[in-house]
Image (cartoon, rainbow, N blue to C red):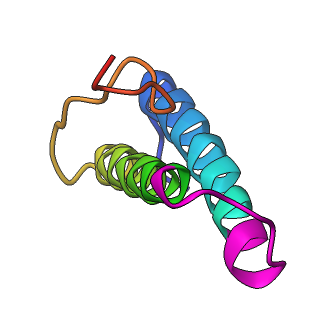
Amino acid sequence: MPQVNATAASDYRLAWEAWQRQVARLHGVLLDSEPIEPAAFKGLLNREARAWETYSAARRRLLGLGEFALPADPDANPFR
């Protein structure tokens, strides 16, 4: 088993968990018909996309495919 950088592993785990929270919320709206306002739905889609990008960067870093900057808080709203 290859050795994994502890920081990369931690970043990966945090990014994975953040993305899964957003996917769970999105699934609630899309699959379970949870009510949501159109503007909130757009925000939800944007948060899920940003969380996926963060997860993808962390995954590449964990796999040694390059160094990528990760946002400080993947759940944060970049427009505030």
- Bounds of the magenta span? 27-39
- For the image, the number of numbered tags is 0
Given residues 61 and 69, the one toward you in this image is 69
> Looking at the image, which residue is at 69% across and 48% down?
21
Q: Is residue 11 magenta?
A: no
- 67 left or right, relative to 33: left
Q: Is residue 9 above or below residue 54?
A: above
Q: Classify the position of the N terminus by image quarter.
A: bottom right
> Looking at the image, which residue is at 71% across and 57% down?
25
Q: Classify the position of the C terminus by image quarter.
A: top left
- 10 left or right, relative to 47: right
Instruction: Measuring from the top left, give residue 3's x and y in whole percent.
Output: 48, 41
> Looking at the image, which residue is at 67% across and 59% down?
36
Q: Residue lying at the far bottom in this picture: please name it.
A: 31
Given residues 6 and 39, the one toward you in this image is 39
Given residues 18 and 7, the one toward you in this image is 18
Q: Is residue 51 above or below residue 80?
A: below
Q: Is residue 34 magenta?
A: yes
> Looking at the image, which residue is at 54% across and 49% down?
40
Instruction: Measuring from the top left, give residue 49's x and y in whole percent.
Output: 38, 57
Quadrant in which residue 67 is drawn: top left
Instruction: Measuring from the top left, give residue 68's x and y in whole percent.
Output: 18, 37
Instruction: Measuring from the top left, give residue 13's x and y in whole percent.
Output: 60, 39
